[in-house]
C-alpha cells in the first residue's frame, strides 16, 4: 500500500469557511464515518460526497454531554481550546462525549484510529499505547461542563480514497478516511459558544 500524508496530525485552524462553501452546493452529505454512526444525526439523509454536518445525540435521545479531552489547551483567535497533548514524547488527541442522560461514552475522535492517518497511515506502535486520562471541558464563561455539540466531517471523496490506497482497503470505508473533523459546542448552562472548539486535520 502507498503511504501518503503521514505527517503528525495536529488540530489546525478552523475550517468553517471550507465547510460553508462546500455545503452551499448541495444539501446531500457524505456517509457517517463508522465510529460516529451511533451518536451523530446528520442534517440530511441524502448521501453524496459533500461534507457531513450533524448533531451529536446519544441513542437514548440525550443531547447534553460532558466533553472529555486530554487536558492540554492553547489559545487560538483569543479563545482557549483543546490541543494535541504531548505525553512522554508521544502525541495524543482524542475527544469523548459522556451523555448526561444515560452515562454512555461516545468516542468522537482519536487521531490514532480515525481519519486518514488513523486508517490509511495507521501506526500500530503509537495506537498500542494506553490512551491518556481525560478531563471534562469546562465552559470558559460559567465553568459548567454540560454542552451540546455539532460535528462536521469532510473528505477527498471515494475515488481519491481508492486511488491513494491502491484498493487495499475496502472502498466502502472511504468515509472513515476523512481529512477534517470539526466540533462546535454550546454550553448547556449559559449558552456560550466558542467560535470553533475543535478543528482537526487528520491527513
Image (cartoon, helix red, strand yellow):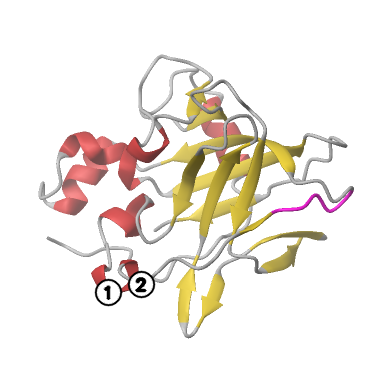
Q: Which residues are magenta?
A: 137-141
Q: Residue extending furthest bottom?
A: 89
**Residue at point 52% right, 79% down?**
87
Depth check, front residue: 187 or 199: 187
User: Does residue 77 appear in the picture of this structure?
Assistant: no
Whether 108 is drawn above or below 57: the answer is below
Q: Is residue 73 toward the left or the right of residue 107 in the image?
A: right
Q: Secondary structure at mark 1?
A: helix
**Residue at point 53% right, 37% down?**
152
**Residue at point 80% right, 49% down?**
139
Local packing at callout 1 (Cα closer than 10 Å; few below 14, some 14-19, many 20+) is few
User: Does residue 52 appear in the picture of this structure?
Assistant: yes
For marks 2 and 1, give the CA distance.
7 Å
Report the disc number at residue 7: none
Residue 122 picture quarter: bottom left
Q: Residue 43 placed where, x, y %?
A: 53, 19
Q: Nearer the viewer, mark 2 or mark 1?
A: 2
**Residue at point 35% right, 23% down?**
48
Report the disc number at residue 129: 2
| Quadrant of the drawing holding the N terminus | bottom left
Helix, strand or loop for the magenta stretch, by majority: loop
Whether 50 is drawn above or below 82: the answer is above
- Pointer 2 with pointer 1, Cβ within 8 A: yes
Residue 107 on the magenta span = no
Local packing at callout 2 (Cα closer than 10 Å; few below 14, some 14-19, many 20+) is few
Residue 193 picture quarter: top right
Q: Which residue is mark 1?
A: 125
Amino acid at each position: 500500500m502507498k503511504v501518503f500524508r503521514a505527517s503528525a496530525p495536529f488540530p489546525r485552524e478552523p475550517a468553517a469557511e471550507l465547510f460553508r462553501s462546500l455545503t452551499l452546493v448541495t444539501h446531500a452529505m457524505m456517509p457517517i464515518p463508522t465510529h460516529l454512526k451511533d451518536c451523530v444525526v446528520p442534517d440530511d439523509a441524502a448521501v453524496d460526497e459533500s461534507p457531513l454536518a450533524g448533531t451529536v445525540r446519544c441513542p437514548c435521545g440525550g443531547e447534553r454531554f460532558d466533553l472529555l479531552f486530554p487536558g492540554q489547551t492553547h489559545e487560538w483567535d483569543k479563545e482557549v481550546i483543546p490541543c494535541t497533548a504531548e505525553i512522554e514524547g508521544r502525541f495524543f488527541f482524542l475527544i469523548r462525549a459522556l451523555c448526561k442522560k444515560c452515562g454512555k461514552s461516545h468516542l468522537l475522535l482519536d487521531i490514532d484510529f480515525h481519519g486518514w492517518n488513523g486508517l490509511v497511515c495507521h501506526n500500530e506502535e503509537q495506537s498500542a499505547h494506553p490512551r491518556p486520562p481525560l478531563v471534562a471541558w469546562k465552559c470558559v464563561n460559567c465553568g459548567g461542563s454540560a454542552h451540546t455539540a455539532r460535528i462536521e466531517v469532510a473528505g477527498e471523496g471515494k475515488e481519491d480514497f481508492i486511488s491513494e490506497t491502491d484498493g487495499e482497503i475496502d472502498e466502502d470505508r472511504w468515509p472513515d478516511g476523512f481529512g477534517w473533523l470539526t466540533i462546535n459546542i454550546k454550553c448547556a448552562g449559559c449558552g456560550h459558544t466558542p467560535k470553533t472548539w475543535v478543528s482537526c486535520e487528520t491527513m
